[in-house]
Image (spheres, coloured by chain):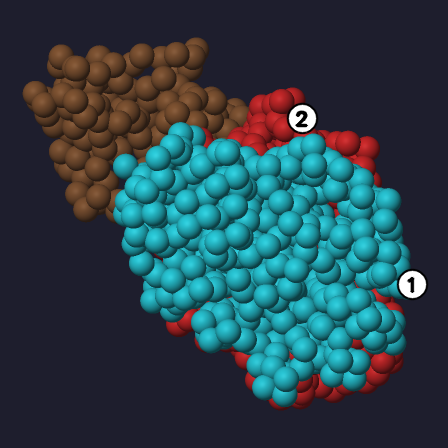
Chain colours: A red, B brown, C cyan
Amino acid sequence: MITESSNNQLEDMSNALPSSQWNHHNVLDLDNFSHTEITTVLSLADRMREILDRRIPRVPALRGYTIVNLFFEPSTRTRASFELAGKMLGADVISVSASTSSVQKGESLIDTVRTLRAMRADAIIIRHEMAGAPYLAASHTDASIINAGDGAHAHPTQALLDLYTMQRHVGDLKNKKVVMVGDIAHSRVARSDIWGLAKMGAHVVLCGPPTLLPRGLGIAERPEHAKNALPFVQIETDIDNALEDAHVVMALRLQSERQENGLLPSLREYAENYQVTSSRLVKAKSDYLLMHPGPKNEGIEIASDVARGDRSIIEEQVTNGVAVRMALLYLLSGRVEPAQIGERTIV
Amino acid sequence: MNKPNDYNLNYQEETLLDAAGIGRTLTRLAHEIVESNSGIENLVLIGIQTRGTTLADRIGTAIGHFEGVAPQIGYLDVTMHRDDFDRDGLRGTPMPTELPSIESKTVVLIDDVLYTGRTVRAAMDALNDYGRPQQIRLAVLIDRGHRELPIRADMVGKNIPTSRNDTVRLNLQEHDGNDAAFVRYGGPSK
Amino acid sequence: MSTLAIHNGRVIDPALGWDGIADVVIVDGKIARVGPNEGDMVVEADRIDATGLIVSPGFIDLQTHLREPGFKHQETINSGTLAAARGGFTTVCAMPGTIPPMDSRSAVESVLREAEESALIRVLPIGCITVGRNGERLAPAGELKSSGVVALTDDGKAVADPNLMRHALQYSTQFNIPIAQHPEDPSLVKGGQMHEGWVATRLGLRGRPASGEATMVARDIALAELTGAHLHVCNISTASSVGLIRAAKERSVNITTSVTPHHLNLTHESVAFNDSYEQINYRTNAKVEPPLREEEDIQSLVDALADGVIDAIASDHSPVSAMEKDIEFDLATPGISSIETAFALSMNLVHQGHLDISTLIHRMTIGPVKAWNLDRQEGCNGLGTLMPGAVGDVAIIDPNLEWTVNSELFASLGKNTPLNGRVLKGLVMKTIFSGEIVNDSTKEQTNASE
């Protein structure tokens, strides 16, 4: 399999863990993934991409394994990506659309998760509009929980596919400048990417208007807890400074509610100051990569020509998403010591 | 290959083949493969990861020497087609699969040790996802018996009767630094 | 005539400046005599041996949610007062956020009637500032005062309209009744689930900035100065609030303030981490309003408690049912069931050397009494002291006993505490109300660690 980074492939594999030593029962965020564990997922994703490229892209590895997509927030791409990932590994996959109004009907998140487990679901993939929902689920069931996005907190599988995509093109991410532009404060993708990129040694820059940058990115008050805060990142409100010599530029979606909630005067003003355009990208490295987690608002956070330009690898991110999710499902499906239920340990 | 029986402290080890022995056996297998196919036309050697691939490379090189042209070679990983849970359901680490076209070809699967036959079954399942060969044959360096499925090798380097407690190991230069095949007799186990 | 003699304890009465070994004699529900050997001179009495223990006036809590009527799944007057007694409290001020809220004579009287039936200790009602706690119209302060309320508050909601707050303060001056405000500006803290800081960012939760409290404290101080009313600032949580109140007191503004034991000891880290910091979690039992803040806020609060800028420790006991906590963090009801651990958690400050025990007891006895002039209420003679003639309310304390918090053993119906599993040092062994023992921890041992 020849890719731009075939050398890096071999290097990665030697750092990766054997699949039988995979130790995470859940995938809630990348904050508790080591560099080696991330490498393990990414090198396995290479194998999974091979499967996707076969004439019959299906293996029976997860035969008899039941996966439930429990989505409280609508989603086309992430849900489809997980469904296909499971099916390509031969698992049984169903998708359940829930809504938080079902809470009012008396069926809480915990009830739903326990019910699904009683139906022998092995893995439950949860997307929820409130931060922490997958953690709540994980402490009430021994099914594997994968976080497909919880409020503004985390989206670990997106971060992994972003890292995988970046590595396929630029190789080792150590010291590479990765710039995220947009509504960072409300972005779970940004947070998980920050963790992942920090573990891989990248230099992360966040850029956006001050009202859309998260507070509390400073170091924790006591130095011994600095590691418990988000990793160190560089903050920039000037997009030209941010983009200078960037290896990777990631535009994040700007939602129109931000203007309604008084965080921005108008989308037009945002676009004037922060839209990722080809003229601004001149400052980036000549072989920069252009990424976006989708769905994109062309003309707002990103110019159309840039989104569809030849540095854009947005569609490849989508393919890689299936491969990365296959890798995670494969690792999770192996038997590991079940995590202790309750507040104490969620692995 | 089985894991060694950790509880058995009284084992005997016997070398089945030394480096020279392995070399000769591989050469013979190479000739047998070509002979049974009446040449190298339409022939594809597919080594099963991880040591089978090394053997396929060596056999292919040998064929190249005496036929003047080498056959096509591929590597096949079967981790995701396994049906056995002798590792207690723990996941094996998938290795790369790189295959030339197998459509209507004569595929010779190559593996180091034939034991229960489940690896070969998985390999045939995996091949199904790539195309439809005209024929599939099996060549192994060592057949140690104890089949659990109706599978037999067409070409065998060496037949070794073993008991289930025994462990058969193959060292190869490319993986282990030397070439040797040996059996560790299980004896009474706890 | 019924007599109770408590022998040989270390009697600490900060109001009278007492600290020494003495006996306390209670006759017919009132303190009769305090002094060395007083107990021996009584011929017939029930006796308690308090050797090695501290004897103090029973604690007074300015802020207890008894939740009845209306929220009996969270607490009742009976369970709440039992919990208070376990915590060493003999008087609690009942918060008015009930259903119906205590914004009328009939609502107050119905609470008092129920308390008569089922309360184990003294219950003093608090009335609402506005009708229905809606922040729109003033509730009838005069009517409420004459029904027996000791203060007015909208219980967990700030009166947001400054002009209405001004009127509330101004109107209250004729009745000499404190207006107790929970100071968080709703517009600044809207949607916030915890303190705005690095932990909120890490957890992806919207935060409530510290200045949401400071802006309202500053506003209310200015209004108190304008009107000359008695403003009580409830459960302050930030260093900036401390600074504002300190300056206001120096200007002799008629202002008092209280702080909770959890705001004195726990930071916003408690929301995400247990002791090991290994893994984040979303600990709804640490979700409270105002939220738990940062180390520097705690230091400032502790200093202010020690030097008297903060008048009282008030538990803000807020029991919540499991169903309301064991859900998504955003949906969880805020509150900590705090009254049973209030003293022990506060003792932490004494053990760490920030506070001496006499000051701590002051802030839980005569401090709150003087803040709201509670000793002028009917039946509250000498409240918060052990002077002869005072109510016979006493707490007997072992300051060094180590015990492990187990919320399953709480008398409160609310098991919502972030302290579960934590070892605390200091326990109220017996609580005496009007000469009767209402709590005996030596019998129902709360998991003392061996």
Please state which of the two labelled residues, at mark 2 or mark 1, is closer to the viewer: 1
Instruction: Label 1, secondary structure: give it.
Output: loop
Spatial CA distance of label 2 from label 1 is: 48 Å
From the viewer's perspective, tell me whether residue A338 is left or right of residue A274.
left
Check contact, mark 2 vs mark 1: CB within 8 A: no
Q: Work out whether A201 lies above or below A295.
A: below
Residue C15 at x, y percent in the picture: 47, 64
Identify residue for label 1: C137
Q: Say which mark, if any, is on residue A115.
A: 2
Residue C293 at x, y percent in the picture: 55, 66
Q: Amino acid at mark 2?
A: Thr
Q: Chain of mark 1?
A: C
Q: Work out whether A58 lies above or below B118.
A: below
Q: Amino acid at mark 1?
A: Arg
Q: Work out whether C25 lies above or below C35.
A: above
From the viewer's perspective, tell me whether residue A323 is left or right of residue C212.
left
Residue displayed at 21% across by 16% down: B165
Count the numbered circles shown. 2
Residue B62 versus residue A334: which sits nearer the camera?
A: A334
Residue B161 versus residue C155: which sits nearer the camera?
A: C155
Residue displayed at 39% across by 12% down: B148
Q: Is residue C172 visible?
A: yes
Q: Is residue B14 visible?
A: no
